[in-house]
Image (cartoon, rainbow, N blue to C red):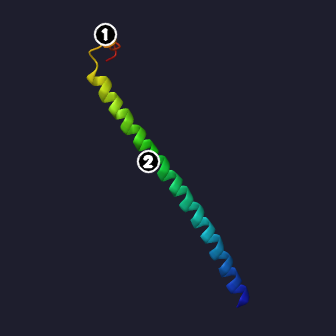
């Protein structure tokens, strides 16, 4: 009985450690996702700004490549 209890305690300890590591990794991934979402938002705004200001001389000289 003591062996079985000891084995269960070891398994529980192992699983708690694994769960903690998974939780930490999920937290880090969520931070990265949030950072990437923020960067995407900034880039979308920048693209809109560039499209709205496309009447510049540089844009007038730009021609699409022939395959378009």
The one nearer the camera, 39 or 1, is 39
Q: Would you identify the image quadrant in which residue 25 lies?
A: bottom right
In this orientation, which residue lies closer to the viewer: 49 or 10? Answer: 49
State the image coordinates of residue 43 (x, y, percent, origin top left).
38, 33
| Residue in the picture at 26% in, 23% down | 52
Q: Residue at x 71, y 83 (%)?
A: 6
**Cα–Cα span, label 2 and label 1:** 37 Å
Residue marked by disc 2:
34
Give the vertical position of 8 relative to 65 (above or below): below
Quadrant of the image for the C terminus? Answer: top left
Please report the residue visible at 28 percent of the width from the left and 20 percent of the height from the top: 53
Compared to residue 59, the image places residue 48 above or below, namely below
Q: Is residue 1 left or right of residue 42?
A: right
**Mark 1 packing: few (<14 Cα in 10 Å), some, or many (20+)?**
few
Residue 32 location (% of width, % of height): 49, 47
Q: Earlier in the sequence, mark 2 or mark 1?
A: 2
Kindly state the secondary structure of the residue where label 2 is placed.
helix
Instruction: Name the residue nearer the viewer: 36 or 64.
Output: 36
Residue 7 in the image: above or below residue 25: below
Which element is circle 1 on?
Answer: helix
Residue on which disc 1 sits: 57
């Amino acid at each position: 009985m003591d062996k079985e209890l000891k084995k269960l305690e070891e398994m529980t300890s192992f699983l708690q450690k694994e769960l903690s590591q998974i939780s930490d990794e999920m937290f880090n991934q969520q931070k990265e996702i949030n950072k990437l979402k923020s960067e995407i938002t900034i880039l979308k705004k920048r693209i809109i700004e560039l499209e709205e200001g496309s009447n510049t001389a540089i844009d007038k000289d730009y021609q699409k490549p022939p395959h378009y």
